[in-house]
Amino acid sequence: MVFTALVENQQVVVAMAADEVVGYYLLNTVSTDGVLATHHQAVETLRQQGQLAPTDRVGTGAQACIDLPYQGTGLRQRLLQQLLKQVAGRFDYLFATIAKENTKAFRAHTGDGWQVRGENNQLYYVVLPVSQLPVQ
């Protein structure tokens, strides 16, 4: 049900190769369960700290998954560009969290233009301006 809503809201981009899904990039502003509830709380904390304006429209739950053989091919960046095009005009920023121990994800996100706006003991809170196309 939630995934159907993501598709209907154009909050997911999927890459296919030989009739198989090899990657995706999505937002999940539909659900507030589990980790997504912490995303909403983190966004509110960033607003209170002045890291985001009260009027900024933030798309939470951003995440990507790319099959290992397709990592390092630019697929993640192309999917992100398409997602940004699909949500332009609806959000000012995308929001994600990155585990501090996941240095590979941190390098990938910051290389794509994501900005660290806050953190807790385990996570970085990162945002990407929707108007910014990621580095190719």
Image: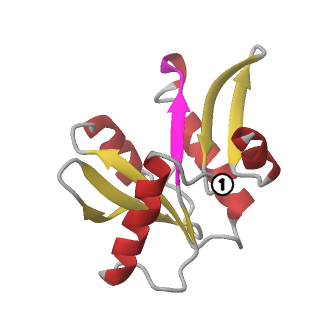
Residue depicted at x 31% and y 36%: 104
The amino acid sitting under disc 1 is Val
Name the element at disc 1. loop
Residue 74 visible, this angle = no
Against 31, is 14 above or below? Answer: above
At which x and y percent is residue 49?
Answer: 29, 81
- Extreme left residue here? 121
At which x and y percent is residue 57?
Answer: 58, 75
- Extreme top residue here? 18
Q: How many marks?
A: 1
Residue depicted at x 25% and y 60%: 119
Extent of the magenta region:
61-68
At which x and y percent is residue 134?
Answer: 52, 56
At which x and y percent is residue 74?
Answer: 54, 36
Confirm whether the magenta stretch covers residue 65: yes
Q: Is residue 43 left or right of residue 9?
A: left
Label 1 sits on residue: 30
